[in-house]
């Protein structure tokens, strides 16, 4: 199958490569770029383990062709740590509130939480629950994930206020 | 603060030992996407395998033509049963003493069965090649109903054993029959039933479902032809057992096989068994000389690897007029699918279902289980429960509710008057178990009080009046559940899998500078072993948990163990951890005494040091002792500070719980909402309360899924109707309630640290709590039994059948 040239920005880094037109974004990230944070859980858009940020929107990278992502800016969980390598606020809150167990849904969940808090910096519990309903977790029962996201929102808002 | 100024309590707290809500050490990796799961493994020259699967549930395979697939550029090999037969690998033994086709040998027995294995340069080419393999089938009559399967004229499913009168578990009485397993006293039980004041009888169905961890099953097999060493990375809940099985079926010497379980994205029983994908990957790597990866997709996962439950449980329970239970009778028709691939200890073909007398003091009982072949996928795994314990819990907790209806009694009171009393432990059950410890009444009273049970009943009565008066269309259900689990398999004298005793192990090495590494025979799939086992060691050894590395899952380095499932890690490997630590402490005591120039008996343990008795100013810390072990010649002692323990538990452990679910149900739409869920767990000694609570939240959410909608459903043709996450219910954050967790602590008397295991309790006890809430909402209108899953449509049907829509 003939290949098409793709160029995108992943976690702030320009990358390019050749890919079959049918190649999915998740496979390009994982197999061509070695970015294995986003996972494959269902390949049908239901579980959200493959969630990445594409041009400021959460997308399920198992149902996006890499060709569609040509020219796009992608952020994965690998891009959410602080510049000094320490855990970002959302990552830290997931750890603090035991918002993960097996860790398989975690990269998608954190990436989704990151976008959710951009869309709605001060969500209610109900809004958090609705906002992450596209990401499945089999281990935690969500209770501590919700708690972690609420705590992250509070901390990010407090930091923003302090800065203003 | 220095060692000298700290109180013993402060020193203990600084260790982050048992009882501490220690943050997980795993999370720094996982939150950054730095986990290493099997699909993350990429080896040079690695190929990708994919299966051609049967679209039919029962068919003869007339021919397989792989020419077009082989001609596709990038395809390296296509394996069929014909290729595996010369190696004797076209069939493989199952954990239940049966055998299973690796690739279709003349026929297929369930939809999704593996027919051919395509190996290609990448996963896209493999998927293309799968489409190019032409298989000619001749359809055969399909049997998906286990009762139909046992009729005299039912089609023969397993032609390979149709004339075999004896199976792995005794006589077979029909060509589709697998085994009969009887426990208890049939004659005495039937006599009690005949003479009882009251007998309640019901058929309880626990439907077929699936563990569905977020990561599917998979492996990477790599045969190094130069060294003759086979390495297999895979989603294995029992890596050592897999190594032994691979050796036995492949003929490769066990020392030449290395099994590695990397990070596992949830297991819940799905990853206990051995699957055709593993065998095919190994063979493909041997044939091609290159590493081969196989990872199933979600549809393959739901269709072919490891279903759970599918038990038809007919029960009869006898009682006096005032509600004292006098006997329990149960017959189970167990649908095992096309092959008996249950993951149970060898002597227990229905697992520990004989725990079905539950938390109650039932003087006499009888249980009979018949296993049956049907045209469904094999499996029968313990989906987040000890072997068949969830089925048992659901059975008894439904039977109690049915009996309460029969007696016109309150179900909480009926439970209370029948609980095994605290003073009866250790308690011998009528079906053969010895419960180690329990205090059911205390837990039950605490739970009822916490939810204001009396108040809830008053509210419910009022709601019923309002409903009858046309003022509301919502009913209130109060779901009760109290169950005793049996976990920690198990004593080698009666528990083995394929002849391997179910002990477990821990090896500890203390480094000269006082930090340590511990390796165990278990493997975490999210339970947080690297965190909690270090806590046990911190308390036992006086070394800070943060100075202890816990490693699992590599058979070349970890001591032999039977793996993680059935809540056995803490009861068995946790015990081994404590015992190995105590061996180290015994040697440390001798070293300390030598260094302090006193007799061994003149020093005593104090949190993180040995002190001279009566002179606490003179001591040697564990850190000092560790260094001495490596730099001093101590008369009569070998250098070094290491120990290993293989722990064979004297008994199982018996955690218990009291759960109460309050549910609102809309009679017209069948929609439900969990208003409150109170969960009291008693898992004995608590190692890390934060992790315990997380386990309870997760297990309850799995229980919610199972009770309220999750199922593997088949149509009459044997087509899987729920093969994607569109149809197979997994609750999102939106449907999932917040849970209130609580606990009592009744330590296990025979476990070194008194811990009983917790991971599975909430699934086991949660299912009856949710289901009983649905039943309870309709009890006043005459509902006695409605089969799960209670999805909106089925709840609407309950209301319709009770005439509530008129």
Image (cartoon, grey):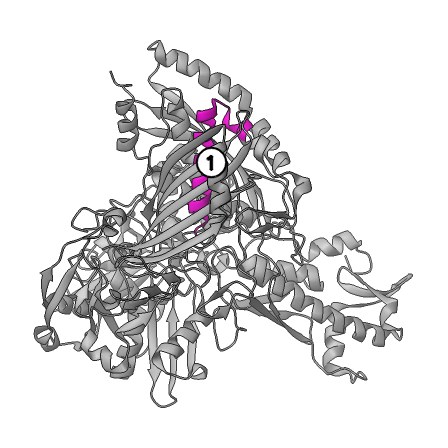
- Give the answer, above or below, for where B332 lies relative to B404: below
The C terminus of chain B - image quarter: top left
Q: Secondary structure at mark 1?
A: helix
Query: Quick check: is B765 in the magenta stretch?
Result: no
Residue B416 placed where, x, y %?
58, 31
Q: Which residue is mark 1?
A: B193
Most common SS among magenta residues: helix
For the residue pair B758 and B314, the one nearer the viewer reads as B314
Q: Is residue B198 left or right of residue B637?
A: left
Q: Chain of mark 1?
A: B
Residue A32 placed where, x, y %?
27, 68
Which quarter of the picture shows residue B630? bottom right
- Give the answer, above or below, for where A106 lies relative to B242: above
**Dot 1: few (<14), some (14–19), or many (≥20) neighbours within 10 Å?**
many
Magenta residues span: B388-414
**Residue furthest right in the image:** B614
Which quarter of the picture shows residue B32? bottom left
**Residue furthest bottom in the image:** B226
- Give the answer, above or below, for where A25 lies relative to B253: above
For the residue pair A41 and B299, the one nearer the viewer reads as B299
For the residue pair B345 and B653, the one nearer the viewer reads as B345
Q: Is residue B645 left or right of residue B303?
A: right
Say if residue B337 shows up in the picture. yes
What residue lies at 61% left-to-right and 30% top-to-bottom?
Answer: B445
For the residue pair B651 and B29, the one nearer the viewer reads as B651
- Give the answer, above or below, for where B805 lies relative to B278: above
Residue B409 placed where, x, y %?
50, 23
**Residue furthest top in the image:** B469
Say if residue B698 shows up in the picture. no
The N terminus of chain B - image quarter: bottom right
């Amino acid at each position: 199958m003939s290949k098409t040239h793709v160029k995108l920005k992943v976690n702030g880094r320009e990358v390019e490569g050749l890919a079959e037109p049918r190649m999915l974004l998740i496979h390009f990230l994982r197999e061509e770029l070695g970015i294995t944070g986003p996972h494959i859980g269902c390949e049908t858009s239901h579980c959200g383990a493959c969630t990445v940020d594409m041009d400021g929107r959460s997308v399920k990278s198992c149902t996006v062709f890499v060709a569609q992502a040509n020219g796009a800016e992608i952020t994965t969980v690998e891009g959410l740590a602080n510049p000094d390598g320490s855990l970002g606020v959302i990552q830290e809150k997931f750890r603090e509130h035991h918002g993960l167990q097996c860790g398989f849904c975690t990269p998608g969940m954190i990436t989704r939480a990151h976008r959710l808090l951009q869309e709605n910096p001060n969500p209610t519990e109900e809004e958090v629950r609705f906002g992450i309903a596209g990401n499945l977790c089999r281990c935690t029962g969500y209770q501590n994930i919700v708690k972690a996201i609420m705590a992250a929102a509070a901390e990010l808002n407090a930091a923003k206020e302090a800065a203003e | 603060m220095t060692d000298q100024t700290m109180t013993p309590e402060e020193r203990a707290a600084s260790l982050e030992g048992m009882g501490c809500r220690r943050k997980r050490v795993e999370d720094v990796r996982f939150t950054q996407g730095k986990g290493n799961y099997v699909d993350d493994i990429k080896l040079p020259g690695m190929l990708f395998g994919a299966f051609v699967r049967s679209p039919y549930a029962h068919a003869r395979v007339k021919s397989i033509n792989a020419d077009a697939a082989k001609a596709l550029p990038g395809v390296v090999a296509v394996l069929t049963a014909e290729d595996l037969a010369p190696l004797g690998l076209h069939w493989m033994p199952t954990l239940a003493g049966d055998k299973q086709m690796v690739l279709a040998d003349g026929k297929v027995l369930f939809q999704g069965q593996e027919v051919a294995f395509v190996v290609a340069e990448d996963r896209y080419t493999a998927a293309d090649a799968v489409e190019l393999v032409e298989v000619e089938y001749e359809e055969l009559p399909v049997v998906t109903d286990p009762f139909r399967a046992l009729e005299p004229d039912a089609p023969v499913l397993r032609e390979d054993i149709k004339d075999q009168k004896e199976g792995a578990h005794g006589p077979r009485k029909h060509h589709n029959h697998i085994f009969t397993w009887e426990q208890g006293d049939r004659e005495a039980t039937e006599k009690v039933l005949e003479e009882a004041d009251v007998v309640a009888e019901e058929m309880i169905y626990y439907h077929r479902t699936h563990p569905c961890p977020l990561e599917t099953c998979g492996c990477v097999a790599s045969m190094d032809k130069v060294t003759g060493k086979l390495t297999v990375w895979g989603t294995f809940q029992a890596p050592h057992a897999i190594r032994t099985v691979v050796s036995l079926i492949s003929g490769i010497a066990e020392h030449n096989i290395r099994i590695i379980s990397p990070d596992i994205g949830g297991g819940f029983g799905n990853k206990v068994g051995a699957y055709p994908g593993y065998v095919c990957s190994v063979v493909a790597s041997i044939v091609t000389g290159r590493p081969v990866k196989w990872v199933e997709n979600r549809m393959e996962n739901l269709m072919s690897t490891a279903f759970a439950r599918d038990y038809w449980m007919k029960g009869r329970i006898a009682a006096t007029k005032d509600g004292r239970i006098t006997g329990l009778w149960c017959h189970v028709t167990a649908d095992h699918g096309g092959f008996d691939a249950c993951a149970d200890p060898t002597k227990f073909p229905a697992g520990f279902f004989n725990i079905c007398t539950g938390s109650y003091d039932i003087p006499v009982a009888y249980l009979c289980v018949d296993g049956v072949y049907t045209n469904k996928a094999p499996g029968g795994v313990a989906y987040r429960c000890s072997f068949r314990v969830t089925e048992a819990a659901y059975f008894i907790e439904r039977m109690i509710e049915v009996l309460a209806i029969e007696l016109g009694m309150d179900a909480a009171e009926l439970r209370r008057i029948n609980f095994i009393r605290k003073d009866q432990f250790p308690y011998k059950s009528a079906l053969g178990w010895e419960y180690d410890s329990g205090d059911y009444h205390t837990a039950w009273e605490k739970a009822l009080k916490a939810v204001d049970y009396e108040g809830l009943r008053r509210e419910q009565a009022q709601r019923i009046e309002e409903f009858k008066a046309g003022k509301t269309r919502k009913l209130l259900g109060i779901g009760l559940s109290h169950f005793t689990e049996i976990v920690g398999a198990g004593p080698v004298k009666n528990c083995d899998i394929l002849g391997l005793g179910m002990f477990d192990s821990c090896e500890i090495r203390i480094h000269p500078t006082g930090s340590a590494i511990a390796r165990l025979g278990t493997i975490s799939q999210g339970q947080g072993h690297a965190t909690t086992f270090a806590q046990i060691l911190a308390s036992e050894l006086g070394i800070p948990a943060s100075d202890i590395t816990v490693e699992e899952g590599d058979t070349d380095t970890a001591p032999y163990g039977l793996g993680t499932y059935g809540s056995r890690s803490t009861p068995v490997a946790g015990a081994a951890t404590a015992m190995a630590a105590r061996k180290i402490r015994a040697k440390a005591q001798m070293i300390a005494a030598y260094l302090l120039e006193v007799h061994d008996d003149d020093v005593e343990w104090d949190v993180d040091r040995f002190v001279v008795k009566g002179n606490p100013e003179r001591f040697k810390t564990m850190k000092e002792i560790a260094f001495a072990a490596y730099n001093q010649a101590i008369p009569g002692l070998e250098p070094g500070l290491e120990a290993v323990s293989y722990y064979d538990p004297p008994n199982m452990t018996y955690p218990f719980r009291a759960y109460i679910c309050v549910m609102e149900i809309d009679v017209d739409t069948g929609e439900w909402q969990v208003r409150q869920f109170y969960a009291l767990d008693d898992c004995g000694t608590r190692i890390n309360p934060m992790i315990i609570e997380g386990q309870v939240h997760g297990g309850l959410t799995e229980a919610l899924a199972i009770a309220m909608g999750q199922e593997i459903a088949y149509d009459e043709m044997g087509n899987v109707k729920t093969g994607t996450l569109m149809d197979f219910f997994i609750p999102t954050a939106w449907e999932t309630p917040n849970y209130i967790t609580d606990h009592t602590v009744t330590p296990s008397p025979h476990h070194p640290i008194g811990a009983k295991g917790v991971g599975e309790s909430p699934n086991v006890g949660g299912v009856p709590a949710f289901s009983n809430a649905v039943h309870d909402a309709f009890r006043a209108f005459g509902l006695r039994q409605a089969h799960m899953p209670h999805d909106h449509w089925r709840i609407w049907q309950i209301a319709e059948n009770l005439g509530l829509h008129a």
